[in-house]
Amino acid sequence: MPAERLLIVEDEDTLCNSLQRVFMREGYEVDIAGSAEDAFKLLEKGTYHLIITDIILPGISGIELLAKYRKTNPSQKVIIITAYASLETAVEAMKAGACDFIAKPLMHDEMKRVVRTALDSCNR
């Protein structure tokens, strides 16, 4: 069975590379993008089982990325991460179709659990 594919969209290189290593060790295929624009280029070339995106990105925000991509791919599973968590941003992310919303700092064990749960059950 082919590995599940993840796309991580995060402009903080250290965090992005750390998450990529964690999930590759778990057996996932992982691509990374530093902006929503870079993510769209990768999404044109292939599909992903799950997208993990920060809200604050250069250019288009993570929520805009989610909303725009889900218009043509309504079953796409997306997890939103942010250092600026608030009830308003969580509600906005969930209304846009996110499976889950996680506040930074990220704990690797929590991320692995949330990703597995999203892949197994999120059907929004």
Image (cartoon, rainbow, N blue to C red):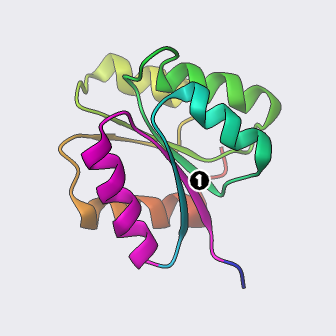
Which one is nearer the viewer's eye here, 119 or 33?
Answer: 33
The N terminus sits in image quarter = bottom right
Judge whether residue 13 is colored magenta: yes
What residue sits 37% from the left and 27% below the top?
A: 90
Q: Is residue 122 something one can see in this rendering? A: yes
Q: Position of residue 121 (x, y in %)?
A: 59, 61
Q: Is residue 113 something one can see in this rendering? A: no
Q: Position of residue 8 (x, y in %)?
A: 48, 47
What residue sits 36% from the left and 66% below the top?
A: 21
Q: Position of residue 15 (x, y in %)?
A: 27, 48
Q: On the image, numbered disc 1 is attached to which residue? A: 50
Region of the chain picked out in magenta, as a range: 3-26
Judge whether residue 99 is colored magenta: no
Q: Position of residue 103 (x, y in %)?
A: 25, 38
What residue sits 55% from the left and 27% below the top?
A: 36
Give the image quarter of residue 2: bottom right
Is 12 displayed left or right of 38 in the figure? left
